[in-house]
Image: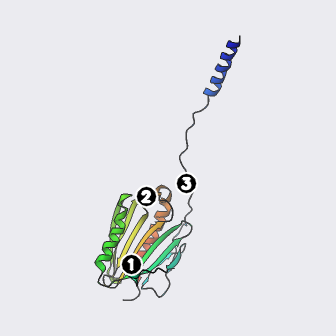
Amino acid sequence: MQRQLSIFIFICLAILTGCKDHYTPKPHGYLRIDLPTDHQYCSTPEGLPFQLQYSKYAEWDTLKVSNKSRENTLWFNVYYPKYNARIHLSYIPIDHNLDSLVDESHRFVFEHTVRADGIEEAAFHYNEKNMHGIIFNLEGNTASNMEFLATDSTKHFLRGALYFMNTPNVDSLSPVINYIKEDIAYMVNNMEWTCQ
């Protein structure tokens, strides 16, 4: 009798526990990112060797960096506090060093080939503004998602790179990356040298 009762309890427990739904793990979710519905721009401070339009939703930050190898270099950040993103800008006056500056910019971009799924280059030329350069679009989980260089080939050289101050994850950051890439394209298309 004791044995039959044990078997009966075992069968009941097996039936009760065996009829549950199978657990399926849910995929990892990301926070919803609310982006502005429009792009609005403001101008850089006066007194710079260039003038550009940056997003009204970003902050302009002039950096004080001491670098004896590049004494005349100016560094700036266009900081998007809501998205923890920065467009790092470096202005370098040309002094018979254009080739090395362009080579260095290409080297910085192509250091990302380890993580990049692809790198697209698009040259631009605005002869009326004496503005020439390249925009690099980097695809994949790279540290920088877009970089550019602009020059007049004789006096001015400006380099920019978009960075997020967190682990790169193109899946979750894609809407913000695309939004800021539009800002960068506007920035480059409307940039001018203030002193010739």
Please state which amino acid type lies under the numbered disc 2: Asn
Relative vertical location of residue 25 with respect to residue 186 in this rendering, above or below? above
Q: Around disc 1, counting alpha carbons within 10 Å, would you say few (fewer than 14), some (14 to 19), or many (20 or more)?
A: many
Identify the residue under disc 3.
Answer: 30
Identify the residue under disc 2.
Answer: 141
Relative vertical location of residue 106 with respect to residue 10 in this rendering, above or below? below
Where residue 67 sits: x, y (%)? 42, 80
Identify the residue under disc 1.
Answer: 158
Mark closer to the chain start, 1 or 2: 2
CB under 8 Å between discs 1 and 2: no
Judging depth in this view, the residue of 173 and 115 nearest the camera is: 115
- The residue that appears at 55% across and 64% down in the rendered structure is 35
Describe the element under mark 3 as helix, strand or loop: loop
Is residue 178 visible from the viewing direction of this image? yes
Relative vertical location of residue 69 with respect to residue 57 in this rendering, above or below? below
CB under 8 Å between discs 2 and 3: no
Q: Around disc 3, counting alpha carbons within 10 Å, would you say few (fewer than 14), some (14 to 19), or many (20 or more)?
A: few
Please state which amino acid type lies under the numbered disc 1: Leu
Q: Is residue 137 left or right of residue 17?
A: left
Q: Is residue 70 left or right of residue 47?
A: left
Tell me where residue 109 sits by quadrant. Answer: bottom left
* Colour convention of the picture: rainbow
Mark closer to the chain start, 1 or 3: 3
Where residue 68 sits: x, y (%)? 40, 82
Describe the element under mark 2 as helix, strand or loop: loop
Tell me where residue 11 sits by quadrant. Answer: top right
Please state which amino acid type lies under the numbered disc 3: Tyr
- The residue that appears at 38% across and 72% down in the rendered structure is 148
Marks 2, 3: nearer the viewer = 2
